[in-house]
Image: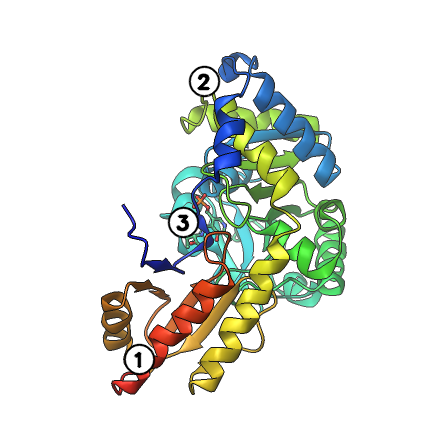
Amino acid sequence: MVGVRVIDLRSDTVTRPTPAMREAMAAAEVGDDVYGEDPSVNRLQEQAAALLGKEAALFVPSGTMANQASLRTLTRPGDILLAGEGAHVLRYESGGPAALAGVHVQTIGRGGFFDGAEVKAAIHPDESHFAPTRAVTVENTHNTSGGRVFPLDRLKDVVATAREHGLSLHLDGARLFNAVVATGTPARVWAEPFDTATFCLSKGLGAPVGSLVCGDASVIRSVHRARKMLGGGMRQAGFLAAAGLYALEHHVDRLADDHANARRLAAGLEKLGFAVDPSPETNMVMFGVEDTLGFLRATRARDLWINPMGEGRFRAVTHLDAPEPQIDEALGRIGEVVAQGIR
Ligand code: TLP
């Protein structure tokens, strides 16, 4: 149980359902979703497909399964998948692309972002020595770059090149709605060029579990088969879908508060003398520290939880359960750490 004093900025995955969300969950109409008979899941899938401008959508337990079931659908063993540096599919999914889809992941560009020319330069010739370059995955917002938004003009350039060369396109949109709120560009515009487009309910949107994969009906049929194979067929999943429906209705616009809190936190850290990555675009703040272990221990000792992302670099994520007063309190506790000579 997290104590009341704890301020948890490790991730936006740590939020707990609000009382109103719990009420919506308790009241959910449910059925057996493996038979396609859960009305709440069906409603969520229809709503997700409509939001992303796709024919169909599938509810899956996690962002990881959303990515892996999509990659299994778009690729064949031996293929190459192009991805930005630090892509979640490569770094944090336990080797899933190799183990489950059988693909090599080749990173291109810098810091998670790339353009059409970089895609083109990576494509192998159609010759028997080379693994076929089959698909491109785009992460938006991009986690390890600090929640940055993939610029729309670069995305259009990537899409044009990928299409010209017959590559499939996957969107890891775990935090797609952060990109939507940060830019005002609707989800369907971001998702339009992708064969498979995912988003998570369990991150900034504040639901306890669940992600969606959206695409053409035929693609989603294949993703459905992969979900079954991966053990992701859930039965009375409507309780979880109800939380997702609630989140889509009530927790999208409020992401702007998380973004404002991230800017507030970044400004405060800068004042305390930390090297902070350029002004946060969404809900993540990346900053440098000199003493990784010392900073981790000293913040934990003050019930402030922030995770390192490698040596000398920390990531703080703002969310529903860390409103503005907690951000100011977090800065106060970091100020105490700095006063102790740790930074
Ligand atoms: N990211 C988590 C950790 O795994 C690092 C986090 O705390 O940020 N795509 C992206 C871009 C993600 O950031 C994540 C989760 C996922 C996929 C996977 O989602 P889940 O955790 O639901 O499998």
Q: Position of residue 124 (x, y in %)?
A: 60, 57
**Residue drawn at (34%, 69%) of the image:** 310
Cα–Cα gap, marks 1 and 2: 49 Å
Question: Badge 3 local density, few (<14 within 10 Å), some, or many (20+)?
Answer: some
Q: Which mark is residue 7?
A: none
**Residue drawn at (28%, 52%) of the image:** 3
Identify the image quadrant of residue 142: bottom right
Cα–Cα gap, marks 1 and 3: 25 Å
The residue at which mark 2 appears reads as 235
The residue at which mark 1 appears reads as 336
Along the line of sight, the residue nearer the viewer: 56 or 303? 303
The residue at which mark 3 appears reads as 14
Q: What secondary structure is marked by label 3? A: helix
Cα–Cα gap, marks 3 and 2: 24 Å
Within 8 Å: ligand 1 and the Cβ of disc 2? no
Relative placement, left or right, of 161 versus 74 is: right
**Residue drawn at (52%, 17%) of the image:** 33
Query: Can residue 90 be seen by looking at this rendering?
Result: yes
Q: Amino acid at mark 3?
A: Val
Q: Earlier in the sequence, mark 1 or mark 3?
A: 3
Q: Position of residue 39 (x, y in %)?
A: 60, 17
Q: Amino acid at mark 1?
A: Glu
**Residue drawn at (29%, 79%) of the image:** 337
Q: Which is in the foreground here, disc 1 or disc 2?
A: 1
Relative placement, left or right, of 68 versus 173 is: left
Q: How many marks?
A: 3
Q: Is residue 214 above or below residue 335?
A: above
Q: Which is in the foreground here, disc 3 or disc 2?
A: 3
Q: Position of residue 307 (x, y in %)?
A: 35, 64
Q: What secondary structure is marked by label 2? A: loop
